[in-house]
């Protein structure tokens, strides 16, 4: 199949599909982190190039509930609406098979509830990250290897005095510089990428 991996610079999902024998191309405004077929630029420049499938990871910065504290400002200056419009343009693309990924956020109400919510620990990676999938003409991903949920980091919020908890991998990413942090958080876990290529690539 001819497959577009949109909004991906890591090459993780692209290379999983290439390994499975498909003609996969990643696309992002950033260059690819690893050598491979990649279009650097606007995904809508190539959206009508006859793809059989698209797996897309539209930016979640202005949509994820983890950033709810900043929603008022983002609504006022239009950034949230831009994120909404981009998501809807992606999910409604004229491609037969589509999967759109995002963390838990406002699109569950603005668009519709996701078809499923998956976790890395269901696919062999010891980590917690709730990942929503909106699917068109694709079946739900089936777990491949249930493992431990991984370590968590706990701390006391200085403002509220409440104990907070987050996955260790996410906490460690926060300690990196902003650009490296974003790359770590945005990269698809390998187990999920392999499951996509194996299960959807056989259709």
Image (cartoon, rainbow, N blue to C red):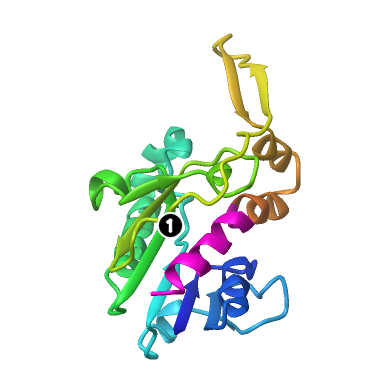
Q: Main secondary structure of the magenta part?
A: helix
Q: Dot 1 corresponds to which residue?
A: 101
Q: Is residue 7 visible?
A: no
Which residue ends up furthest to the right in the rendered image? Answer: 176
Is 200 above or below relative to 163?
below
- The segment highlighted magenta reads 186-203
Residue 11 image point, x, y percent: 63, 70
What's the residue at 62%, 40% (across, down)? 127
Q: Nearer the viewer, residue 45 or 33?
A: 33
Q: Please tell me whether residue 188 belongs to the stretch shown in magenta.
A: yes
Question: On the image, which quarter does residue 31 sit in?
Answer: bottom right
Q: Is residue 172 visible?
A: yes
Q: Nearer the viewer, residue 90 or 177?
A: 90
Q: Please tell me whether residue 96 belongs to the stretch shown in magenta.
A: no
Answer with left or right where residue 78 lies relative to residue 92. right
Mark 1, other Cα within 10 Å: few <14 / some 14–19 / many ≥20: many
Answer with left or right where residue 180 lies relative to residue 56. right
What's the residue at 65%, 40% (across, down)? 126
Is 170 above or below relative to 165?
below
Q: Nearer the viewer, residue 198 or 180?
A: 198
Q: Quadrant of the N terminus?
A: bottom left
Q: Quadrant of the C terminus?
A: bottom left
């Amino acid at each position: 199949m001819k497959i577009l991996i949109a909004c991906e610079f890591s090459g993780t999902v692209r290379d999983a599909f290439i390994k499975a024998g498909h003609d996969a191309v990643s696309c992002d405004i950033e260059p690819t982190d690893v050598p491979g077929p990649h279009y650097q630029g606007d995904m809508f420049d190539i959206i009508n190039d006859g793809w059989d499938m698209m797996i897309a990871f539209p930016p979640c910065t202005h949509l994820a509930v983890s950033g709810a504290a900043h929603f008022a400002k983002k609504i006022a200056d239009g950034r949230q609406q831009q994120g909404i419009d981009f998501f809807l343009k992606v999910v409604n693309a004229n491609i037969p098979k589509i999967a759109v990924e995002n963390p838990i956020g406002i699109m569950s109400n603005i668009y519709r509830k996701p078809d499923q919510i998956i976790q890395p620990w269901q696919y062999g990676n010891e980590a917690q990250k709730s990942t929503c999938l909106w699917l068109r003409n694709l079946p739900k991903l089936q777990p491949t290897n249930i493992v431990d949920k991984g370590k968590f980091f706990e701390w006391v919020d200085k403002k509220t005095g409440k104990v907070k908890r987050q996955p260790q991998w996410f906490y460690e990413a926060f300690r990196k510089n902003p650009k490296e942090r974003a790359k770590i958080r945005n990269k698809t876990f390998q187990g999920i990428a392999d499951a996509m290529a194996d299960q959807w690539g056989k259709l």
